[in-house]
Amino acid sequence: MHEARRFRIADGPVPEPAPGEVLVRVRSVGICGSDLHYFEDGGIGQSRAKLPVVLGHEPTGEVVRTGSGVTGWSPGDRALLEPALYCYHCEFCRSGHHNVCSNIRFYSSPPDPGFFREFVAMPAHNLVPLPKELDWNVGTLFEPLGVVLHSLRLAPVSIGQTVAVFGGGPIGLLTIACLKASGAGRIWAVEPVAERRELATAIGADVVLSPREGDVVKQILADTGRRGVDVAFDCAAKENTIAQSIHVTANLGRIVITGIPSETATPLDMHELRRKEAVLYNVRRSNHETDAAVAMLLEAPNRFGAMITHAMPIDNVQRAFEMLEQKLDGAVKIVLTP
């Protein structure tokens, strides 16, 4: 991305893998909501893009060659490519909380280019085997699915508990799928786009509501006898959805913000939170959930793959982002390919 809302294709040298690194050929990359933030807003919160920037952090790839000292990987091996680079030495890494590493670097966040490119040289320990039963495109879901599984570790939902999910994009749909698999009770999905509401129903939502067609807070409260739901997952993180999540949650309930707000500062109804003694969780990527995500994808690849609505060549990256920004042609998750 060389300027706001504008991509260009550029040529560059193929990198050489350093000791401990593997050179991979990127085979598929999913477009994430955070990529859209860079496209639309020029950054995320106080973190601003230094242009030009290579985006993309939901990749699968094929090993081309290895640097010295690397064992266990050979040319032709299929891999999931973990985009986070941790220091492994700070107090948070040492305590197992790598996702909030003090010195974290991240492919696609300046200064580290992402995976919208043909070849990437990266540490061997950032590769995870991609099972042959999963195709390249479905494999890209390991990264967002790991984020969703992490959100459920923060706020586990017990069998039969009621849940509201705000946002029917990829993170919202994956959340609904995981909630259904975990035995959650009634699930309400709130999403303005009709095609996404249809996918939410197909993947497990019991009730789908459009915020354009009525007061969703009143509807959910009426459906629950004014009690509210046990847990609300905000996978959109707009100003109104954060407030709505708080207002639909029952006393002693939990609100999980998985989405990323566009605003640098977001208002909160602290009095509503205080009166309910509700707990508010924020999600920062995933943390050791990759293996579980791969297992879930292997168990139901078609179910999860249904949310990949488009696969497009990288040359069409501009069109792909415009489709997602404007919600054209039923676009939900778009995967870019060579």
Image (cartoon, rainbow, N blue to C red):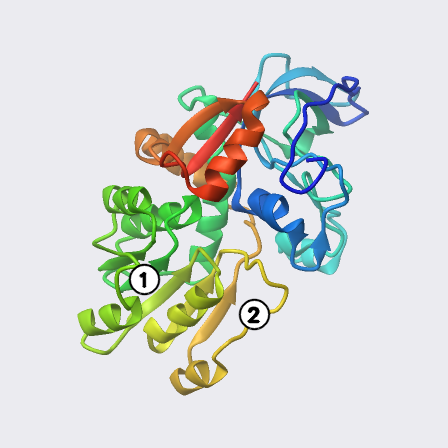
Give the quadrant of the C terminus.
top right
* Residue 31 rendering spot, x and y as whole percentages: 53, 36
Mark linked to residue 164: 1
Q: Is residue 316 visible?
A: yes
Give the quadrant of the N terminus.
top right
Secondary structure of residue under mark 2: loop
N-terminal of the two: label 2 or label 1?
1
Vertical placement of residue 301 versus 112, above or below: above
Query: Foreground residue, 168 or 231?
Result: 168
Vertical placement of residue 17 versus 196, above or below: above
Is 308 placed left or right of 260 in the picture?
Answer: left
* Residue 215 rendering spot, x and y as whole percentages: 28, 68
Mark linked to residue 120: none
* Residue 90 rendering spot, x and y as whole percentages: 75, 56
Vertical placement of residue 227 versus 229, above or below: below
Query: Foreground residue, 152 or 324?
Result: 324
Mark linked to residue 266: 2
Q: Residues within 10 Å of mark 1 (few under 14, many from 20)?
A: many
